[in-house]
Image: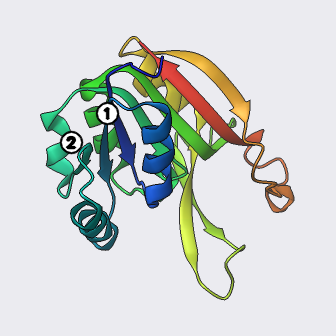
């Protein structure tokens, strides 16, 4: 419904085009965004320059808790967040309905009770970028114990990730889009 009024948190949002697309489809959206300081500053400059009314830039992680969100979007970002459990706890407390994770790496094998492992991304060589792979069941348990359920769990069709170098050491590995709801 294009007249629906709702709050959307874009955690890790980087591009103004996502807001512009949503605003075109849903004129009553309240768009909240949080990212690292430099990107937050870019959003603030754009908001001021173009007089965007429905954007709130959450500069401090604690500011996220000041609102309730109908939809929380983690767009290919949670695997780069060191304090992810704190962030997910905030998301659970502030979510009114949906939490979405796109392009997230999950593995199935239990490895010394580790909830996540750190891997080096090699698609940006010579830059060294590290990210987390999450044990799917441990990750999901954070939500199921808070009465969230899976709406969909699908392979991300944008990325064609090659996991061959891991062999079977992590069990099934997937590059996943995951939508959860209460």
Note whether 46 is above or below 109 in the view shown: below
- At horizontal 26% and vertical 42% (from top left) the residue drawn is 54
Q: Are marks 2 and 1 in contact (CB under 8 Å)?
A: yes
- Mark identifier at residue 29: none
Which coloring applies here?
rainbow
Q: Residue furthest bottom?
A: 126
Mark 2 residue element: helix
Q: Position of residue 97 (x, y in %)?
A: 38, 17
- In the image: residue 180, left or right of residue 27: right
Please identify, in this view, whether the residue under mark 2 or under mark 1 is nearer the observer. Answer: 2
C-alpha separation, residue under disc 2 versus residue under disc 1: 8 Å
Note whether 41 is above or below 63 in the view shown: below
Q: Position of residue 76 (x, y in %)?
A: 55, 51
- Mark identifier at residue 64: 2
- At horizontal 28% and vertical 43% (from top left) the residue drawn is 86
Q: Which residue is mark 1?
A: 91
- Count of marks overlaid on the render: 2
Q: Nearer the viewer, residue 95 or 27?
A: 27
Note whether 154 is above or below 126 in the view shown: above
- In the image: residue 115, left or right of residue 44: right
Mark 1 residue element: helix
Note whether 123 is above or below 166 in the view shown: below
The quadrant in which the C terminus is found is top left
The first of marks 2 and 1 along the sequence is: 2
Q: Position of residue 133 (x, y in %)?
A: 59, 50
Label 1: how many residues lie within 10 Å, few (<14), some (14-19) or many (20+)? many
- In the image: residue 148, left or right of residue 56: right
């Amino acid at each position: 419904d294009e007249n629906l009024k709702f709050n959307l948190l874009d955690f890790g949002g980087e591009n103004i085009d996502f807001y512009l697309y949503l605003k075109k489809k849903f004129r009553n959206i309240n768009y909240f965004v949080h990212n690292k300081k430099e990107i937050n500053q870019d959003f603030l400059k754009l908001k001021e320059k173009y007089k965007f009314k429905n954007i709130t830039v959450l500069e401090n992680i604690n500011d996220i808790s000041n609102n309730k969100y109908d939809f929380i979007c983690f767009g290919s970002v949670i695997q780069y967040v060191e304090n992810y459990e704190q962030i997910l706890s905030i998301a659970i407390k502030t979510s009114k309905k949906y939490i979405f994770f796109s392009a997230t790496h999950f593995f199935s094998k239990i490895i010394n009770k580790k909830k996540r492992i750190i891997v080096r991304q090699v698609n940006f060589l010579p830059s060294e970028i590290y990210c987390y792979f999450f044990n799917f069941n441990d990750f999901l348990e954070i939500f199921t114990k808070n009465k969230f359920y899976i709406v969909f769990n699908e392979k991300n069709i944008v990325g064609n990730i090659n996991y061959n170098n891991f062999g079977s050491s992590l069990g099934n590995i997937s590059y996943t889009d995951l939508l959860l709801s209460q």
